[in-house]
Image (cartoon, rainbow, N blue to C red):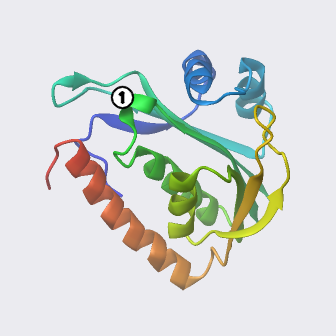
């Protein structure tokens, strides 16, 4: 996927990103992770991969914030588990969440993941639809998983990531995602 010319970039999360990540975490989630959790994940957990989507310019008349979103996943042998994904509330519905998710899925696939799993709030229909688009299916439920309101989490899983069919799906999704993001940010090919 070619992001050249767009006013943001995807980078590995660094320790200097943690304050902005925690601030966004507090804005987005009712029970945010503390800074020490992110510090541990990016500096001590060799199984974790965290990326940030940072603004690097203006989008039309609006100046992008320094941090637009982030995603984190763990890769244990051939299984990837997405643990967190967030997008700045003012910049949603422009394909950025999907861009972050696509990055995690594609990277995990390249690293040898055969399956990908995650938990999602049962009430989070937009996220569930996104994950289904990437082939994840509901495989189970964690009762009262979310401590803020006791909501259940749905366990969603995709298998067959190494297959040619899944690779073609990712390519097709990347093409439509790139077009969507460019249109959302006023960029044309």
Q: Is residue 31 visible?
A: yes
From the viewer's perspective, is residue 109 above or below residue 45? Answer: below
Q: Residues within 10 Å of mark 1 (few under 14, many from 20)?
A: some
* Residue at screen point 55% across, 55% down: 125
Between 93 and 158, the residue placed more toward the observer is 93
Q: Is residue 41 left or right of residue 92?
A: right
Per the image, the residue denoted by label 1 is: 55
Q: Is residue 159 left or right of residue 144?
A: left
Residue 39 place in picture, x, y as percent: 73, 24
* Residue at screen point 44% across, 31% down: 89
Q: Is residue 9 left or right of residue 109?
A: left
From the viewer's perspective, is residue 93 above or below residue 62? Answer: below
From the viewer's perspective, is residue 48 above or below residue 147? Answer: below
* Residue at screen point 61% across, 26% down: 25
Q: Is residue 52 visible?
A: no
The N terminus lies in which quarter of the figure?
A: bottom left
Between 118 and 160, the residue placed more toward the observer is 118
């Amino acid at each position: 996927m070619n992001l050249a010319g767009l006013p943001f970039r995807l980078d590995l999360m660094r320790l200097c990103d943690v304050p902005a990540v925690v601030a966004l975490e507090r804005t987005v989630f009712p029970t945010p992770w503390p800074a020490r959790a992110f510090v541990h994940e990016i500096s001590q957990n060799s199984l974790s991969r965290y990326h940030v989507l940072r603004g690097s310019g203006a989008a039309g008349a609006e100046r992008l914030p320094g941090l637009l979103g982030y995603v984190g996943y763990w890769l244990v042998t051939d299984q990837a588990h997405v643990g967190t994904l967030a997008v700045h509330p003012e910049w949603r519905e422009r394909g950025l969440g999907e861009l972050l998710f696509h990055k995690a899925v594609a990277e995990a696939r390249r690293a040898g993941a055969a399956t990908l799993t995650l938990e999602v709030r049962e009430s989070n229909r937009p996220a569930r639809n996104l994950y289904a688009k990437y082939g994840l299916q509901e495989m189970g439920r964690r009762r009262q998983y979310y401590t803020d309101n006791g909501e259940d989490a749905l366990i969603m899983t995709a298998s067959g990531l190494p297959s040619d069919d899944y690779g073609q799906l990712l390519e097709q999704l990347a093409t439509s995602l790139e077009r969507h993001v460019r249109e959302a940010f006023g960029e044309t090919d």
